[in-house]
Amino acid sequence: MAQLFPSRAFRRTRERASGLLFALGVDDLSPVLTTGQTLALVRASGRTVFDSVGRVSTIAHEQYAWSSVYNSEDGVWEPTLDLQAASTNLCLRSEDFGTAWSAAGTPTRTAAAFRCGDLVLDLIGDDAAGAVEGYQQVITFTGNGVKAVSLFVRKGSSATSALRLQDTTATADRLLCAVTWSGDVPVVTMTTGTFVGAVPCYGGVYRLLFQTAASLTAANTNVLSLYPGASVALANATTGSLYAGGVQVENFGTPTAYIKTLGATVARRKDILTSAIAFAPQTLTVYCRTVNYAGINAPLFWLGTGGGPGAVDVRRFGNLLRISVTDGANVTQTVDVAMPTTSVLEFAAQFTALTTAPAGRIDTGSGFSASTTAGTGFAVWFANSLWFGTGSAPPTDDTSSLNSGIRKLIIAPGARTLAEMRGLNV
Amino acid sequence: MTWAVYLNETPLDSIGVWVQRINSYTAAPSREYPTLALPGRQGVVLTADPSMSPRTVSIVCSVAPSGASISARATTEDRLKGLAYRALIKLVVDDDVTVPRQIDGVCTACEVTTRQHPVDAVVSDATLTILCPDPTWYDVTGQVIGFNAAASQVPLGTAPSGGLVRITAPSWSANVVNPTLTYLNAAGVTVQAMAFTGTLTAGTDYLEVDLNRQAITMTSSGVTTNAISWLTTGEFFAVDPMDGDPLNDSYPQLQVTASSGTPSATWLGVRRWL
């Protein structure tokens, strides 16, 4: 496999050695691990990623999804290996308001007015003070419940724009928000639904992520509307323009990576990343640095893999982070800690005495938590594999992938501190 | 960040080894040009491209672990020698001024001298000599630069970079037929164009151009085959800072087009410095 860094030219002799048990660091954009294991990636479809300056790029089947994410605390773009669940964009012509969308009033439109890599944004405008103008599309959902809505925007001339998903059968809003601007940064004010976050992209473009209210009924007629020059009151007085595109609506409640559509819905398959492991259960520390994507209930890693005795994992659990140890008697002990609010999540999870009295504790930066109750030791893992997210099982569960990017996952022998693990140059 | 030197994944200060200086760290690698004197003509002519010498870095440091004991000093010396004599080492220098830089090499010598008699010394001096076949320093973080028919700039350091170009036929495109990869200088003038003959099936295929190893492969639904025969015109190139002005954030560019279809491409590479 082709590599970027010169060490790879040494493969005819030996790779760099490492005293670690497992070391995935994505900075060299290589799936080759210095600890010798082989990563396995399965994804039978193309997908999009963000390049190192935040432009949308497209990759093909089985291509590793090196994707960048903006670290707002440090003001830098960080490389990650992005793992996404399967999903389908239900919105047709996601970047072309001139087709498949119906006009409300007589909005103005400049097609493909701004390019952000493989994404183009139309400049749409409301130029009539006496009417609310914009674009609408009927979305066909499968199943009731919370749905994900997302779109890319860039500041135009408008002071306020409105996004709405309305059940026109029940005459009820499932999503309604206003987008205003603080400088060139969007400010989202929700009336109905949940604002998940704004992802900074290239050239002043932001990807806005939403969840609808829980009561969406799929059998009803649900209309997605974007009004570039309107407030949430949908009053007639305001005008203005907005760069918009990359509209995505999904059947699940978690906004996932962008899927470009033309005349039909488009599906993306799940990223399944796993690795075989050959080291035995022992006292060890797992360090993970990943994108802190709130609201996703998925394991960050699963060592030994679940379903039986002899496995450990750390997962998001609502607004908490949960460390789990499934002991030799197949009893799972857990401890929860608060999820940090930073854009980057990093932690050290210590798993001690796995063969005799297994326990785990976790440090997200404010000191180690209490330990899980010590259980029955185990001499072998339930399975000799490491899963990122939920790995390959259950394969039909579309909501249980990592749904974000991972930058480092290091497993070191012994009980080490977060500072020690963070200092490792992987 | 703070000043730090790493051997592979280990920061030296974390084991009680304190770096005092690094020789040949900031020097540019030397170059040699083969020359030929022609009778009847003054001076010489350059007969081939220059060759660049390997870099030899020496790290001068003190072994002074916490605890200030003879046994701790001896243990740390063992650890340092063990780290240094791995088959291949990655040396990372974070000078707290520029971005951290790394270089790969092999340790050819590790001299350790105690400051007192070995039975009485708690501190020793060590010098590591590291031979680096590739003399350029690399950014510790690779970059992914996306481009398509609209050219994108490729940020560089002060040395040329190779990298991997992957040309994809997106699922939202028609099949990509006969793609052309074009390397342009910062002014937008074509420096090199690699034209390929072949069809990339939309959604499943990508063409990989390895500018470091001068290889081309095509991957279809995860199955990779040699595709060097796709290259019909043009030559491999390096993305070179002399085609831009890096100190003023002006860089050479990459672009991909096709006779039909809408190709999308990424450059995976790493900045390099002299």
Image (spheres, coloured by chain):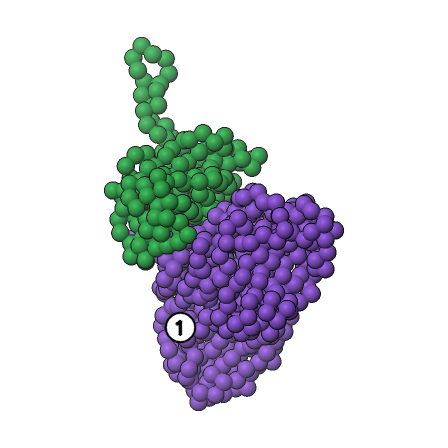
Residue that mark 1 sits on:
A395
Between A286 and B33, the residue placed more toward the observer is A286
Residue A384, given in percent of the width and then of the height, sits at 37, 75
Residue B273, given in percent of the width and then of the height, sits at 48, 40
**Chain letter of the residue carrying label 1:** A
- Residue A116 is left or right of residue B34, and the answer is right
Amino acid type, residue under disc 1 in the picture: Pro
Q: Residue at x 55, y 54 (%)?
A: A102
Residue A422, quarter of picture: bottom right
Q: Residue at the top extreme?
A: B40
Q: Is residue A251 above or below residue B176?
A: below
Residue B264, given in percent of the width and then of the height, sits at 42, 47
Residue A229 visible to an observer of this rendering:
yes
Between B9 and A107, the residue placed more toward the observer is A107
Rendering colour (chain B): green
Q: Residue at x 50, y 30 (%)?
A: B187
Question: In the rendered picture of this protein, how many numbered marks are placed on residues?
Answer: 1
Q: Residue at x 53, y 74 (%)?
A: A144
Q: Residues within 10 Å of mark 1 (few under 14, many from 20)?
A: few
Rendering colour (chain A): purple
Residue A111, quarter of picture: top right
Q: Is residue A75 above or below residue A388?
A: above
Quadrant (top left, top right, bottom left, bottom right) of the N terminus of chain A:
bottom left
Q: Secondary structure at mark 1?
A: loop
Residue A236, given in percent of the width and then of the height, sits at 72, 53
Residue B212, quarter of picture: top left
Q: Is residue A256 above or below residue B107?
A: below
Q: Residue at x 50, y 73 (%)?
A: A143
Q: Is residue A172 above or below residue A381?
A: above
